[in-house]
Image: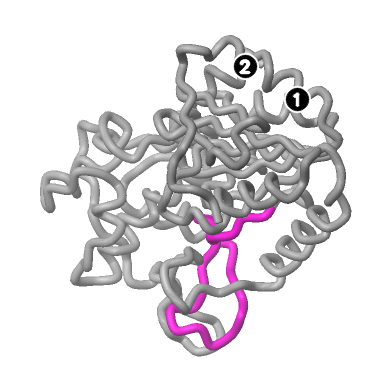
């Protein structure tokens, strides 16, 4: 058990901590990256403010949504409207590149290391930045996958083509670089034709997102292969000098990355724990001497390493 008292380090000693992290990264035999929503936020994938207003002004005007998440959980009356909202949501968070090259910088830092990534993010940013697919484990799903809403099988379905058709049917445009263009001069349709509503090819029920929210989440063959590769990586590097690099992980699901990283650091005296987060960078006293905690913008910190 870890004590409830936490040791927090802030930007007051940021320079020294960055230098220490740089040294530990260089000397590490292996790097295990644990990434949460804060990493994608640093890369520019924000879910409120100007970006939200740009793509969802019609839904904001109609329903008063304050951010993408509130719209994502809204019980729309029809699947036509539900998928109109969700298709835009998926497209801008899954099929366009992050506005800032934070993931690219992270790859530069670890590409010559023995690394593995476990992430609760579902935006596919690691693969878009060309991380090795066989060194990635997306635990909570993928914006790019559909599944049966009442799973009749443990299968998922790529949704890029379907999502493209949905956003185009609403009057949006897709630029040559893949970005989504939402014209402010013409009225968008906040609905899609019924023939575009995705249904399961096996049972005919409506499809839904492959995102972990309850017991119906489908862990397909790809999910299980990735989980096995991650477990094998941990097992075969158990006594090495490991850097557990936690990036932007909060407390929504601490049992997936944060707590296991603390526990594995405590068990392996050769290991090091690093926590980079905007305002929640800390470590338990039990591993304080082998921890680097830096509060600040993750992208800015990575570019100083």
Q: Residue at x 68, y 18 (%)?
A: 20
Question: Left or right of 59: which side holds 86?
Answer: right
Query: Crowding near pointer 1: few (<14 within 10 Å), some, many (20+)?
Result: many
**Residue 93, percent across and down?**
46, 44
Q: Is 34 or 61 nearer to us in this picture? A: 34
Question: Left or right of 32: which side holds 70?
Answer: left
Quadrant (top left, top right, bottom left, bottom right) of the C terminus: top right
Q: Residue at x 61, y 27 (%)?
A: 292
Q: Helix, strand or loop at disc 2?
A: helix
Q: Residue at x 23, y 62 (%)?
A: 74
Q: Which residues are magenta?
A: 137-159
**Residue 1, percent across and down?**
55, 56
Query: How far apart are the two marked residues, 2 and 1, measured between alpha carbons?
Result: 10 Å
Q: Which mark is residue 18?
A: 2
Q: Is residue 153 magenta?
A: yes
Q: Is residue 224 magenta?
A: no
Any part of residue 239 in sight:
yes
Q: Which mark is residue 24?
A: 1
Q: Helix, strand or loop at disc 1?
A: helix
**Residue 44, percent across and down?**
44, 29
């Amino acid at each position: 058990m870890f004590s409830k008292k936490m040791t927090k380090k802030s930007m007051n000693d940021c320079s020294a901590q960055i230098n220490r992290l740089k040294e530990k990264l260089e000397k590490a035999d292996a790097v295990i990256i644990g990434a949460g929503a804060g990493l994608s936020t640093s890369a520019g994938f924000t879910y409120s403010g100007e970006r939200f207003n740009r793509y969802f002004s019609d839904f904001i005007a109609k329903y008063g949504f304050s951010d993408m998440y509130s719209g994502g959980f809204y019980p729309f009356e029809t699947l036509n409207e539900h998928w109109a909202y969700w298709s835009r949501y998926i497209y801008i968070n899954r099929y366009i590149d992050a506005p800032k090259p934070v993931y690219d910088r992270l790859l530069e830092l670890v590409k010559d290391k023995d690394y593995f990534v476990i992430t609760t993010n579902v935006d596919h940013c690691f693969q878009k930045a060309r991380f090795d697919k066989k060194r990635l484990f997306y635990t909570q799903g993928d914006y790019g996958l559909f599944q049966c809403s009442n799973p009749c099988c443990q299968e998922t379905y790529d949704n890029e083509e379907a999502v493209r058709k949905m956003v185009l049917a609403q009057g949006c445009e897709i630029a040559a670089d893949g970005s989504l263009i939402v014209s402010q001069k013409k009225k968008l349709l906040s609905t899609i034709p019924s023939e575009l509503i995705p249904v399961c090819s096996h049972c005919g029920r409506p499809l839904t997102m492959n995102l972990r929210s309850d017991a119906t989440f489908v862990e397909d063959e790809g999910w299980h292969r990735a989980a096995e590769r991650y477990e094998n990586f941990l097992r075969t590097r158990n006594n090495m000098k490991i850097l557990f690099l936690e990036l932007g992980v909060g407390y929504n699901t601490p049992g997936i990355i944060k707590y296991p990283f603390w526990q594995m650091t405590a068990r392996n005296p050769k290991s090091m724990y690093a926590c980079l987060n905007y305002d929640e960078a800390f470590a338990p006293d039990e591993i304080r001497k082998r921890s680097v905690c830096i509060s600040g913008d993750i992208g800015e910190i990575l570019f100083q390493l």
